[in-house]
């Protein structure tokens, strides 16, 4: 007894449900031929097939945000739904609607053309004017949590849900089919949507493959078609050759001499055709296409915006390449230099607004203007609440830390004392480094004291105020009046008294410094009030001196990093003088010098001690970084704080000193061009306040979710001509074309360059043909003809789209008498094996 089993398959914009045949034998045969079976029940329902017409609900939204400098576009996003999926019916293709007996028509209908690209799949019957199926070549496995069913999604239906999008897997790698389990699912979808409701597919198949496709992968595809679907015959071809056939079928064969350059999703190929015969032995392939460009743009954006709040997906990067990228028409380096012009940068910049979320507070009275102003009492109360909350948190943290340390210590001691004898306990103490129990108790007291100090520090409690004036009664007592314990206590009190005196002296020094600083401020205020012009001049001079000091320190740090600089050489001389053993004031032979004092007054000036900082500079940065580096950073930090204080005074009392004159604003202006690449700002049109506002994205969700694409628009496609820009170790397109042309005579070269045929979706990027012409013209001999034609131009195909040209060429070839002669029949497959291939003008060859 077979248990009931149910497998539901969902494909492109539809749900496909296979039911049992009337007889069990029919079902077993269908299971062997078509592994993708659906429901098995105890009863035998009649066969049926549901093909829906309405798509599964999902949407692409494009939002345009106005901008004065550049256009802003929202990246398309996908919205999923959890509502139950209805199973409507899909009518059969137009060519089959007039027939009543579908099984009979399928045997007599034209051949099926399947165009397998690395990014999309197009399929239909040979007598159709356009492909009936046009979808992405991805398959996804989806698990429905509500019904606990595993669902297979094919094509664009793989993007219906976030989980299905993450599980979407392509059928190809670098244009070669590698996942044949997913390919079988895709073929099931194609045949079922084309109306093939029979046990086998009784149609000749015409399918595309990559140029120089490996024999092994072609054999697996033939095995899949002949063994699983029982197709009568199959024929393989190259998409670019079919595209050329569609646009040049009305031209005599002896005049069909062209250089076909196909730049598609995963690669770029160059195929020379002479008198209608493709020379595949002289063809070449470049590993660069639309897929590599989208990955390159994704990596550039990840580096440029490392802290971007959203995640850019490869699909979004692919859309950005198609919508905004273009080739440099003449010279890439010249176009990059144009971005130094702020106006050109602002015009070429594209702003991509990603979705963002903001918290909007409810407004019950929308007619009244909302105000966020608070009174002084409210602000004071709010600040007091924050202070009290901080104190409570600090007190709780200190109490927890103290209690934990005390508990751990006491528990450890108690566990030792209660579980062991006194002798073992003392032995354990000696192993831990204690001589007796008193030493352990002293350590516990010391630890408790430290915890208490830490708690008081966190809570802001002044220990000196709590303790009051300490007393040291044994300090003045003579030693002969004290016993051994008294002497120990006297020594301890001496140390405590010394520490107390040191703290008192430091406190007195701080008070004196505070009084001195107050006196300086008082005198400075008097000078400012009595003679404001002189005071402003003095502050200005102080400000300039600080700027020079900071600049000199930075300059010296840069010079010390170069061992050939004058500063580095002076440092080496100082090291040599310090390392010499010669006593100051004596000669080498020991005699004293005359008329030269022994004291050189070193140290009289505080700047003399900087020599030691010069000595322990970059060479010893790994040894004394904790001392010298800290001193350098402390001095620099003090200078910066003093500079900010002086700037504050000048902004308050000097009318000629504005916010634009501060150090940070001047620094920002110098780096405004780099900020323009990052935030899309025009330095020539925007003021510093506008730049500051644009750069300050903290708390602004809308600005934080923006990408600015400017120089990347021409940088991303450029690796097709300069692959090293993307780390591809290959020659560029022009070098490869030169290599291909050298294989032919000069007469054939002129004929090939007279008609360069461009096809492939990647060639739709703007300026592709212009850049190729400008790059090819200098490398060709003088007087050589050069003409470039795009696939899809009205002059070639009467207005047909470039995307459909390969499929239309396949359909035209399938209707010709040569199609049956160049197809691999089932008998040839069984006799010669799966690696057998029938060569024809539009396909690959076994031997070159």
Image: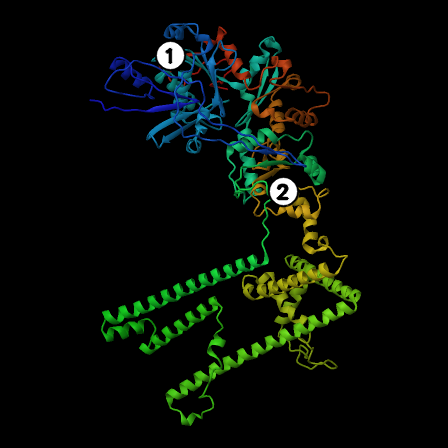
- Work out how far the residue at label 1 is from the one at label 2, CA to CA, in angstroms: 62 Å
x then y, percent, for residue 771: 66, 27
Of the pair 744 and 440, the residue shown nearer to us: 440
Name the side, left or right, on which 610 lies relative to 539.
left
With respect to residue 450, does 471 lie above or below? Answer: below
Of the pair 709 and 373, the residue shown nearer to us: 373
- Residues marked 1 and 2 touching at CB (< 8 Å): no
Name the side, left or right, on which 787 lies relative to 93.
right
> Residue 221: which disc?
none
Which quadrant of the figure has residue 141?
top left
> Residue 826: which disc?
1
Which quadrant of the figure has residue 603?
bottom right
* Coloring basis for residues: rainbow
Which quadrant of the figure has residue 377?
bottom right
Secondary structure at badge 1 equals helix
In this rendering, the count of numbered labels is 2
Name the side, left or right, on which 484 lies relative to 578.
left
Image quadrant in which the N terminus is located: top left
x then y, percent, for residue 640: 65, 61
Q: Which residue is mark 2?
A: 679
């Amino acid at each position: 007894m077979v248990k009931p089993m149910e497998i539901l398959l969902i494909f492109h914009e539809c749900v496909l449900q296979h039911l049992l045949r009337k007889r069990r034998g029919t079902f077993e045969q269908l299971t062997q031929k078509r592994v993708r079976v659906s429901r098995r029940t105890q009863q035998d329902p009649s066969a049926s097939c549901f093909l829906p017409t309405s798509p599964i609900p999902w949407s692409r939204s494009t939002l345009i945000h106005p901008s004065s400098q550049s256009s802003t576009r929202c990246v398309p996003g996908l919205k999923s739904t959890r509502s139950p999926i209805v199973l409507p019916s899909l009518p059969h293709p137009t060519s089959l609607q007039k027939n009543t007996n579908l099984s009979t028509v399928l045997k007599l209908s034209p051949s099926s053309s399947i165009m397998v690209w690395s990014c999309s799949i197009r399929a239909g019957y040979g007598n159709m004017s356009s492909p009936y199926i046009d979808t992405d070549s991805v398959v996804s496995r989806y698990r429905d949590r509500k019904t606990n069913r595993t669902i297979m999604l094919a094509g664009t239906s793989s993007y219906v849900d976030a989980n299905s999008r993450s599980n979407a897997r392509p059928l190809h790698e670098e244009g070669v089919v590698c996942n044949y389990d997913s390919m079988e699912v895709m073929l099931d979808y194609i045949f079922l949507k084309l109306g093939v409701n029979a046990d086998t597919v009784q149609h000749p198949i015409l399918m595309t493959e990559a140029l120089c496709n490996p024999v092994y992968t072609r054999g697996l595809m033939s095995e899949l078609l002949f063994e699983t679907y029982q197709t009568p015959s199959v024929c393989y071809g190259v998409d670019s050759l079919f595209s050329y056939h569609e646009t040049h079928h009305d031209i005599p064969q002896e005049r069909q001499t062209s250089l076909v350059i196909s730049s598609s999703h995963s690669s770029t190929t160059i195929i020379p055709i002479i008198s209608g015969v493709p020379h595949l032995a002289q063809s070449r392939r470049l590993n660069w296409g639309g897929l590599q460009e989208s990955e390159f743009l994704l990596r550039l954006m990840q580096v440029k915006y490392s802290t971007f709040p959203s995640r850019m997906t490869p699909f979004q990067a692919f859309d950005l390449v198609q919508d905004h990228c273009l080739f440099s028409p003449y010279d890439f380096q010249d176009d990059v230099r144009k971005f130094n012009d702020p106006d050109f940068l602002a015009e070429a910049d594209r702003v991509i607004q990603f979705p963002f979320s903001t918290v909007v507070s409810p407004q019950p009275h929308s007619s009244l203007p909302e105000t966020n102003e608070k009174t002084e009492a409210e602000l004071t109360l709010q600040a007091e609440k924050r202070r009290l909350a901080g104190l409570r948190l600090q007190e709780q943290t200190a109490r927890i830390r103290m209690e934990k340390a005390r508990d751990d210590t006491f528990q450890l001691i108690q566990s030792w004392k209660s579980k062991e004898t006194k002798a073992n306990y003392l032995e354990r103490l000696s192993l831990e480094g204690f001589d007796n129990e008193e030493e352990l108790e002293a350590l516990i007291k010391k630890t408790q004291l430290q915890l208490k100090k830490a708690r008081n520090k966190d809570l802001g409690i002044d220990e000196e105020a709590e303790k009051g004036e300490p007393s040291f009664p044994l300090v003045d007592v003579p030693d002969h009046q004290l016993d051994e314990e008294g002497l120990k206590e006297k020594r301890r009190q001496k140390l405590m008294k010394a520490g107390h005196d040191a703290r008192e002296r430091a406190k007195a020094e701080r008070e004196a410094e505070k009084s001195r600083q107050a006196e300086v401020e008082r005198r400075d205020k008097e000078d400012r009030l009595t003679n404001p012009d002189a005071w402003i001049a003095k502050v200005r001079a102080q400000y300039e001196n600080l700027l020079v000091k900071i600049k000199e320190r930075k300059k010296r740090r840069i010079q010390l990093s170069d061992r050939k600089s004058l500063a580095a050489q002076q440092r080496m001389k100082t090291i040599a003088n310090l390392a010499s053993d010669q006593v100051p004031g004596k000669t080498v032979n020991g005699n004293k010098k005359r008329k030269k004092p022994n004291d050189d007054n070193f140290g009289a000036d505080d700047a003399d001690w900087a020599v030691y900082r010069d000595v322990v500079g970059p060479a010893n940065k790994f040894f004394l970084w904790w001392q010298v580096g800290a001193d350098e950073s402390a001095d620099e930090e003090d200078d910066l704080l003093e500079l900010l204080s002086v700037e504050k005074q000048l902004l308050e009392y000097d009318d000629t000193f504005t916010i634009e004159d501060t150090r940070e604003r001047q620094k920002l202006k110098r780096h405004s061009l780099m900020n323009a690449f990052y935030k899309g700002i025009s330095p020539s049109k925007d003021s510093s306040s506008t730049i500051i506002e644009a750069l300050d994205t903290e708390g602004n969700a809308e600005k934080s979710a923006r990408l600015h694409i400017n120089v990347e628009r021409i940088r991303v496609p450029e690796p097709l001509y300069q692959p090293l820009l993307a780390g591809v170790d290959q020659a560029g397109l022009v070098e490869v074309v030169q290599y291909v042309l050298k294989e032919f005579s000069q007469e054939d070269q002129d004929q090939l360059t007279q008609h360069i045929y461009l096809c492939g979706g990647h060639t739709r990027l703007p300026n592709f043909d212009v850049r190729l012409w400008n790059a090819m013209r200098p490398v060709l001999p003088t007087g050589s003809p050069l003409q470039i034609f795009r696939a899809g131009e009205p002059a070639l195909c009467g207005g047909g789209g470039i995307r459909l040209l390969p499929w239309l060429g396949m359909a035209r070839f399938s209707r010709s008498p040569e199609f049956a002669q160049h197809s691999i029949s089932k008998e040839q497959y069984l006799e010669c094996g799966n690696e057998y291939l029938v060569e024809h003008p539009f396909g690959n060859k076994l031997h070159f």
